[in-house]
């Protein structure tokens, strides 16, 4: 099978390049933002890279649809239209079949929809999410409304906000909370932040007695790191290795309001060790709750894989880390929406405990690049769905 990788300054240009080079047999696998051009790393510009493969045969359904649309065009134009017009229409149909859209013969994509698609692509939303928004615009707004790009933009921002699910009751229903996730997402620092905000009481909540446990005794310095946090915050910390040790410590900390359990960072592809860790965590009891920590810098394909491979842990919600390291979070918003997963907390720095807050729709929308937000209207719309009353 032949694979390809093409780059261009914009999403639209790279698609045109792929279509020109490989035709309708080109199938897209992934896209990402890259730096292109420049000299010795200087003066480079941001661009889009798309990878894919060349299919040997077009799906039969697409071939049939294409032939049907050709026939409709030929029947409609008869002898009144030139062959050039017919060929243009057929080319348009091919392009829309390839990209997954369903425009009628002669119908062109509205410029506002095209602009929105480019903005969503630049923010690294998944292709399926972009297609969903495009289709919704086409069927929900009139031509006059589409001509008003400010209205289109405001509408799309609201739809993006509505697609974000916030778990505002997280950490209120369980005494034992477990944090799992891949290596390098900042689980230990996040555990310390959670211990601090619940130990001192925030957002009108009373201070709780907190304990920290860790089973991460493999990573160099991990044990010392969490013990140092514990000493600074005057919160007891214990390190365990086995099911029975974890069970004993859970029993020993029976008087605590909240027990936070830090885990070993594992690759989502390491099925065996993930299964072993799951068995150890069973010692926390059936009433414990699991949260998945995931970095905001994770690309779309990896977000999907992480969510799937940690599914056996039956995690309640997602804690988004490292939001300060990226300005593009369409990857997270779109995949969580498609997989019907919620967000509980957001972290955006290394400082304990300041750089953590309950997940809020407005906070995420502020990270959209290229969109102009009407904050007052958004605050009013999403206030009742937020975990806290303050937005600034």
Image (spheres, rainbow, N blue to C red):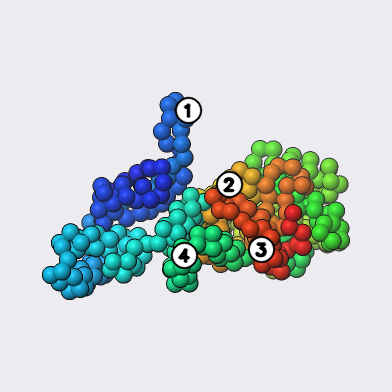
Task: Tell which circle, 3 or 1, labels the residue nearer the N-terminal end.
Answer: 1
Q: Within 10 angstroms of label 3, few (less than 14), some, or many (20 or more) residues?
A: few
Q: In this orientation, which residue lies closer to the viewer: 302 or 279?
A: 302
> Residue 42: which numbered mark, if any?
1
Secondary structure under tag 3 reads: helix
Q: How far apart are marks 2 and 3 (CA)?
A: 22 Å
For marks 4 and 2 on the same chain, the one whose residue lies earlier in the sequence:
4
The residue labelled by disc 4 is 146
| Residue bearing the label numbered 2 | 327
Q: Is mark 1 on a helix, strand or loop?
A: loop
Element class at badge 4: helix
Q: Which of marks 2 and 1 is nearer the N terminus?
A: 1
Residue 378 is drawn in which quadrant? bottom right
Instruction: Report, in whole angstroms, how far the alpha carbon at label 2 lies from the one at label 1.
Output: 21 Å
Residue sticking out furthest to the top: 40
Q: Residue at x 83, y 42 (%)?
A: 232
Cα–Cα span, label 1 and label 4: 40 Å
């Amino acid at each position: 099978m032949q694979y390809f990788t093409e780059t261009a300054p914009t999403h639209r240009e790279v698609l045109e390049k792929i279509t020109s080079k490989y035709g309708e047999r080109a199938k897209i696998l992934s896209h990402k933002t890259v730096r292109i051009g420049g000299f010795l790393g200087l003066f480079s510009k941001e661009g889009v890279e798309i990878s894919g493969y060349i299919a040997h045969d077009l799906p039969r359904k697409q071939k049939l649809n294409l032939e049907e649309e050709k026939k409709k065009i030929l029947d409609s134009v008869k002898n009144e239209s030139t062959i050039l017009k017919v060929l243009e229409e057929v080319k348009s149909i091919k392009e829309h079949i390839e990209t997954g859209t369903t425009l009628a013969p002669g119908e062109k994509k509205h410029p506002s929809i095209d602009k929105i698609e480019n903005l969503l692509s630049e923010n690294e939303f998944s292709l399926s999410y972009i297609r969903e928004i495009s289709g919704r615009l086409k069927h929900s707004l009139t031509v006059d409304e589409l001509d008003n790009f400010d209205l289109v933009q405001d509408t799309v921002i609201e739809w993006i906000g509505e697609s974000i699910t916030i778990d505002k009751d997280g950490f209120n229903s369980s005494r034992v909370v477990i944090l799992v996730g891949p290596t390098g997402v900042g689980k230990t620092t996040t555990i310390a932040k959670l211990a601090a905000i619940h130990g001192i009481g925030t957002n009108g909540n009373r201070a709780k007695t907190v304990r920290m446990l860790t089973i991460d005794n493999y990573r160099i310095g991990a044990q010392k790191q969490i013990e140092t946090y514990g000493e600074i915050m005057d919160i007891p910390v214990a390190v365990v290795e086995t099911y029975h040790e974890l069970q004993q410590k859970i029993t020993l900390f029976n008087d605590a309001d909240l027990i936070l359990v830090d885990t070993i960072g594992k690759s989502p592809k390491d099925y065996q060790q993930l299964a072993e860790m799951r068995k150890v965590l069973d010692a926390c009891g059936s009433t414990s709750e699991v949260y998945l920590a995931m970095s905001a810098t994770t690309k779309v394909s990896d977000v999907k894989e992480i969510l799937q491979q940690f599914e056996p842990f039956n995690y309640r919600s997602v804690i988004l880390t490292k939001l300060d390291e990226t300005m593009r979070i369409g990857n997270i918003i779109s995949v969580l929406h498609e997989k019907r997963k919620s967000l509980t907390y957001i972290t955006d720095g290394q400082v304990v405990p300041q750089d953590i807050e309950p997940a809020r729709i407005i906070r995420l929308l502020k990270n959209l690049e290229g969109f102009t937000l009407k904050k007052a209207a958004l605050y009013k719309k999403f206030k009742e769905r937020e975990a806290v009353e303050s937005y600034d």
